[in-house]
Image (tube, helix red, strand yellow):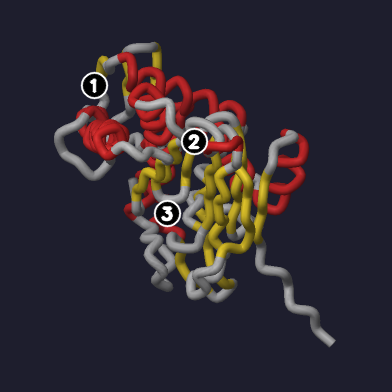
């Protein structure tokens, strides 16, 4: 899941509490093992090693592919699960290595959902192409986990996977959960904003931990699949509240991809959102 995972629950009975936590943990591990791009033995690995041959997928994978195709369409092609191959050129670990134009251009022929043949349940990639569910997988795992938590207990439960979270309901006494949005200064542990959440989910996308440094400053890990480079003008952080974590995550990603127009996009969607940017320094 790319970060710490936790379950918070208002449950006095230890047996019930363990039942909830174990259900969430099992769900997280199942989705991690099935869809992680880092494993050599799952459906993603089979698709990425297909070398142009068609691959028939199960219903859950087909639903994720349909969702990825939807976001691709809504983003005018900016969200693209085939763009993960660009990680061969970019390493977003805080270093200052910027790939050359030649390195990026060599990978661009392998990027583009429009080059993929998808007729559920059969997917066909061109040789050398890959898919990566990293942009939607964690939020999907949160939503699946919170459903299982609700089945295991009627208690108030919060599931948080690396900062993307959802709740079953408000806390006892109809009190909202109070959630802190992490600031963009990683050295400051204080939350930049406190959000009261009585229903639904929150998702965040940003460059606090995944970035490279350049002469122009920090470059986000959010890449434009059309040119293979970080999106220009993207905020440092975008957080969205929505009915589901999957929906919230989709909106944060679409906002980041819009760069300098992120705030305008979120306002047009009518959702609760919080955007953090580095303000330009005024010159005398």
Image quarter hosting the N terminus: top left
Vertical arrangement, residue 195 with respect to residue 138, above or below? below
Farthest residue, direction bottom = 284
- Disc 2 or disc 3, which is closer to the eye? 2
How crowded is the residue under tag 1: few (<14 C-alpha within 10 Å), some, or many (20+)? few
Mark 2 or 1 closer to N-term?
1
Say what secondary structure mark 2 lies in.
Answer: strand
State the residue at coordinates (45%, 29%): 113
Mark 2 or 3 closer to N-term?
3
Task: Choose between 39 and 56: the one closer to the eye.
Answer: 39
User: Residue 52, how many percent across, how many down?
Assistant: 26, 25
Q: Which residue is mark 1?
A: 53
State the residue at coordinates (58%, 33%): 199
Image quarter hosting the C terminus: bottom right
User: Residue 44, how many percent across, how many down?
Assistant: 26, 32
Task: Choose between 244 and 255: the one closer to the eye.
Answer: 244
- Can the viewer see residue 109? no
- Indicate which disc residue 219 carries: none
Q: Which residue is mark 2?
A: 167
In 3D space, how far apart are the residues under numbered discs 2 and 3 (Cα atoms)? 41 Å
């Amino acid at each position: 899941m790319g970060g710490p995972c936790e379950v918070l629950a208002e449950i006095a009975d230890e047996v019930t509490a363990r039942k909830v936590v174990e259900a969430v943990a099992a769900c997280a591990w199942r989705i991690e093992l099935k869809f992680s791009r880092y494993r050599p033995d799952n459906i993603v690995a089979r698709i990425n090693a297909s070398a142009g041959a068609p691959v028939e997928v199960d219903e859950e994978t087909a639903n994720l592919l349909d969702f990825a195709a939807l976001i691709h369409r809504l983003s005018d092609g900016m969200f693209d699960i085939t763009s993960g191959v660009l990680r061969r050129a970019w390493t977003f670990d805080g270093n200052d290595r910027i790939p050359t134009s030649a390195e990026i251009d060599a990978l661009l022929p392998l990027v583009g959902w429009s080059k993929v043949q998808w007729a559920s349940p059969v997917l066909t990639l061109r040789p050398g192409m890959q898919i990566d569910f990293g942009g939607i997988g964690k939020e999907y795992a949160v939503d699946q986990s919170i459903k299982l938590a609700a089945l295991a207990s009627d208690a108030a439960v919060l599931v948080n996977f690396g900062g993307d979270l959802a709740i079953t309901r408000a806390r006892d006494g109809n009190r909202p959960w109070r959630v802190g949005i992490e600031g963009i200064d990683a050295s400051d542990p204080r939350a930049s904003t406190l959000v009261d959440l009585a229903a639904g989910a929150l998702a965040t996308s940003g460059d606090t931990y995944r970035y490279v440094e350049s002469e122009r400053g920090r470059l986000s890990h959010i890449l434009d699949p059309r040119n293979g480079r970080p999106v220009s003008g993207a905020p440092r952080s975008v957080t969205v509240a929505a009915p589901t974590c999957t929906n919230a995550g989709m909106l944060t990603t679409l906002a980041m991809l819009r760069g300098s127009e992120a705030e305008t996009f979120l306002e047009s969607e009518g959702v609760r959102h919080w955007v953090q940017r580095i303000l330009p320094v005024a010159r005398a």
